Every structure is written in structure tokens, then in C-alpha cells.
Image: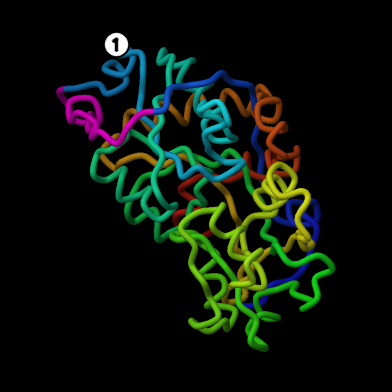
Amino acid sequence: MTAHRSTRRDFFKTSGLTVAALAGAPALISGCSRVDNGGSTGASAETDPLAKFKQAGTIKVGIANEQPYGYRDKDGNLTGEAPEVARVIFKALGVDKLEAQIVDSFGSLIPGLQSGQYDFIAAGMFITPERCAQIAFSNPDYAAANAFLVAKGNPKNITSFEDIAKGDTKVGVLEGAVEKGYAESGGVKGDQIKVFPNQNAAFKGILAGRVDAIALTAVSLRWTLQQQYADEPLEVTESFVPVVDGKEQVGAGGYGFRKNDTALLQAFNAELKKLQDAKGVLPIIEKFGFTQTEVDNAATLTAQQLCAGS
């Protein structure tokens, strides 16, 4: 794999995509109770899951507490790029509340959905063929390039996964995130990769000297650095697009559903399309550091394309 540097704007000019945004209100944070089967599996011929959620007035969502994608704010309210867009969509579908369950690690999101702990995932999760084999995805609402969090001044001159592979540099990734695969494809050895359970642990890991860089989306790194670690001697590198086997890895995020919740997914996609066509996505998510670039690049993509790896 090679990773070439480019600005996010350059990336999206060459890739071509589209999306939009809106604003939302706080939601409830729930415990770890399992979702009742009657309200969560609902794609059978006998039941309409959306009707059940409308009647209940709420739907349960899984998040990984990763800023700015889906997290609990200082007052305990559910917020972030993905929940705020989902809140607008489900309100249009007649479901007024999102009830959040926070998992311990990003890698726990898909198993939690499959086991019925919540009804969908709103965590900015990249749509990949591997994940599509396990769950169903909505169409994407954003597309973003990658970057590294490094020490101020970037003393080890880390700009790509290949730079890390050359020496004894260590990189941190989140459990279950795509960056581990990008690193391995770029020649980074297993003992150079440190897996952290969540974003906060990763930031603390680089500050403690356990790794030399953290690989995540540029949006996530810049937002978290600005919001929580602005006084620390850290910086975010220029964004880039990872390339695996000669192919750009488009990082486009969507919402995860169980494979049998077809009707629910179709209803969600229909409202997302309306929101995108109305240019409504950016007004919701720009406060989380997203730009028109990330939004527009998503709107030309579909989950079907991304699941096929095309």
C-alpha cells in the first residue's frame, strides 16, 4: 500500500461524492439493557419495525463515545455528527428520541448491534466490504481523509504508513477501526501497532510515549485536539488518502443496521436522500469540524458501491 499526501479538498475533487447537515437536541443515555426482540428485529412480513418505534417514540442507538462522530457531552447528552443527523432523520420518520448506549470500544459496535443491544449504529463508521458482510449500511453522509496525530513539530517526519514501516516508529489505532488494516497493508509490522480501546485512551497513549503517532480521520483528530488537548504538545499532520493495492481507500461513513431490518434501512435512506437534496446535512455537522467537502463527497456514493469496494 502507498499513501499519497493531499489536502482533503484535493482528495474530494478527484474522488467525487455529496451530502448535507442539520442541528439536533439532546437525548437520553441508557444502560446496557438488551433491546426487546419485538422492537428490534422487525423486518419480518408480520411486523413493521418503524411503526413500533413510532409508537414507543424512541429508538436505541449504539455509539463508541468518539468525538466528533458520536459521543456524550459534558452534560451527559447524546451528540456528535452521526447522532445529530440521525435525530433529524428519525424525527422526520415520527420517532422523537434517540436513546444511546455507549460501548467500551469501537470494535464492540457491530457485535452489540448483532446481539440486539441497540437498533442501529450512529458512530461515523466507515462502510467497508468486511463490515458489510456483517451488517447492513445506510448510504454515507460524509467522506473524510486520514491523518496522524504526532508530537509538536513532527520530529519523526511521519506523513504516511510507509514512513512508520521504515523504522522502529509505533502507531496507535482504535480497536475495530480501518486504520489497523491500512497500517498492515503499508508494511507496518505487528509489534509497531498499538491498539487502543477508544479515542481518549489513544490520545493519552501518545502523550505517555507509548506510540509515536495515532492514525484516525483528520476530522476526528483535529476536533479532539482542539476541544480536549489544545494545550498539549501535539499536532495533526496533513491529511492523506491511504492506497491499498493501487486503489484509494475512500473513507465514507454511514449508519449500521441489522441485515434483516430492510424496511427500516430503506426508510432511513429515503429521508437521508431528502436531507442531502435539501442541502441540510452541513448545517447540522459543520459545528463538529466538517466542511462542504466532506459532505459533497459523500452524496455521490452509495452503500452498495462501498460494500462492493468500488
Which stretch did the figure color magenta? Answer: 30-46
Position of residue 298 measured from the top left corner of the image (x, y, whole percent): 62, 43
User: Is 32 covered by the magenta stretch?
Assistant: yes
Q: Work out which residue is located at the far bottom of the displayed protein and give it.
A: 167
Residue at 67% in and 88% down: 166
Amino acid type indicated by mark 1: Gln
180 falls in the magenta region? no
Residue 265 quadrant: top left
By secondary structure, the bulk of the magenta-drawn segment is best described as: loop
Residue placed under numbered mark 1 in the picture? 55
Check disc 1 and report its element: helix, strand or loop. Answer: helix
Q: Is residue 268 shown left or right of residue 115? A: right
174 lies left or right of 109: right
Within 10 angstroms of label 1, few (less than 14), some, or many (20 or more) residues?
A: few
**Residue closer to the observer: 185 or 26:** 26
Q: Residue shown at 36%/18% (left/top)? A: 58
